Amino acid sequence: MPALVLLGAQWGDEGKGKATDLLGGSVDYVVRYQGGNNAGHTVVVGDQKYALHLLPSGILSPGCTPVIGNGVVVDPSVLLSELSGLNERGVDTSKLLLSGNAHLITPYHTEVDKVTERFLGKRKIGTTGRGIGPAYADKINRVGIRVQDLFDESILTQKVEAALDFKNQVLAKLYNRRAIRTEQIVDELLGYAEELRGYVADTTLILNNAVDEGKVVLFEGGQGTLLDVDHGTYPFVTSSNPTAGGACTGAGVGPTKINRVIGILKAYTTRVGAGPFPTELLDADGEALRTIGGERGVTTGRDRRCGWFDAVIARYATRVNGLTDFFLTKLDVLTGWERIPVCVGYEVDGERVDELPQSQSDFHHAKPVYEYLPGWSEDITRAKSFSDLPKNAQNYVKSLEEMSGAPISAIGVGPGRDETIQINSFL
């Protein structure tokens, strides 16, 4: 039985929650391996809509064990609030497992995040202000607070004190903010300890044993490939690795145990926050995609920037992730256009390029080269098989598959759980 990685193949918000939920009934474990509550998934189950920010989407599947791996940064107040909200709606959250090695987002991380963005002004990155970057920075600087530290007051106090020695200098002298007291942070964090204790486990051991026993384990990335700190549009990226390699470090499972890597693609392209976006539309078509597609960030509440499908990005995602399959989402949003542009390459300084430019400057100045595919007007939301789609919609999917370099194995034709065409099994 397979171990699968499921990740975003664009700038995030591609519909990973729908894909994960689709697989959830057949999967034993769903694992978040990176990111924090800056990533949002919307999952529609019947007439119920769930907005998940930190929890794995598999928490909505009764037979599935949701796992937050060591590569995630966890805001304990957000986690407990999200669990409480689901419990109130009748969702069983008792099976959640939380790695003791996951790092915590503290109030001083969110404070540093917000004041830094304000200080940068026009040069700001466009972070969510939720402390994710500063928490990862502390992890790399070896002054981070881990979940396991909540259960040793002495160690917790020492670590918070060490972290604040420097941060208070920055807050007070650079940003003119009031210093944060160690006792205030320690008391708040200790207040979460007992509520979280029952969820904490050696998740690396559990997941490796599960794979060895033939159980199906799904590793779920937040954000998307082009937001990866190493492989994305740096510096306009997140602070972790949503790409497939991040699943190994963020969950503690070796690469030889991964069988398939599934990339989620929207039938068009969106991104949230600052940074280059070659196919971005600032016209009526862009507004139509935003309105019809409901393109507003689940976590941020910000309108998403919208543009036509970018095959250059899709090919890049196939390469850096080793993608075996694509899940194409939101095909229904494109219904009604007479013809649909698809970006097949870029023009950079007067020259045609067909792969992602290595230079940040070149990518910033890249202009899309479009091919135009005929559109369709028929309602496709009730399609149950590929042959049910209008011929032009079939041709659009086939063209995207050929341009992107991996087979499209499933297609989302609506927001509902059952509004999906399965072409090839992921399992």
Image: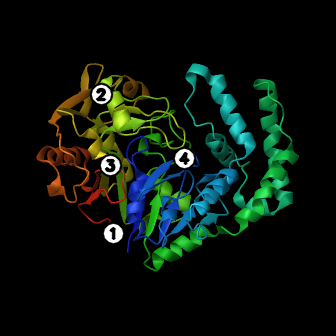
Q: Is residue 208 left or right of residue 226?
A: right
Q: Amino acid at mark 1?
A: Leu
Q: Which residue is mark 1?
A: 427
Give the Cα distance between marks 3 and 4: 24 Å
Disc number for residue 329: 3
Q: Are marks 3 and 4 in contact (CB under 8 Å)?
A: no
Q: Which residue is mark 2?
A: 285
Disc number for residue 240: 4
Give the Cα distance between marks 1 and 2: 37 Å
Secondary structure beneath dot 2 equals helix
Please tell me which of labels 1 and 3 falls first in the chain. Answer: 3
Mark 2 Cα shell of 10 Å, populated few (<14), some (14-19), many (≥20)? some
Please tell me which of labels 1 and 4 falls first in the chain. Answer: 4
Q: Residue at x 59, y 66 (%)?
A: 93
Q: Residue at x 36, y 28 (%)?
A: 287
Q: What colouring does the structure picture have?
A: rainbow
Give the Cα distance between marks 2 and 4: 33 Å
Q: Are marks 1 and 3 in contact (CB under 8 Å)?
A: no
**Marks 1 and 4: which is nearer the front?**
1
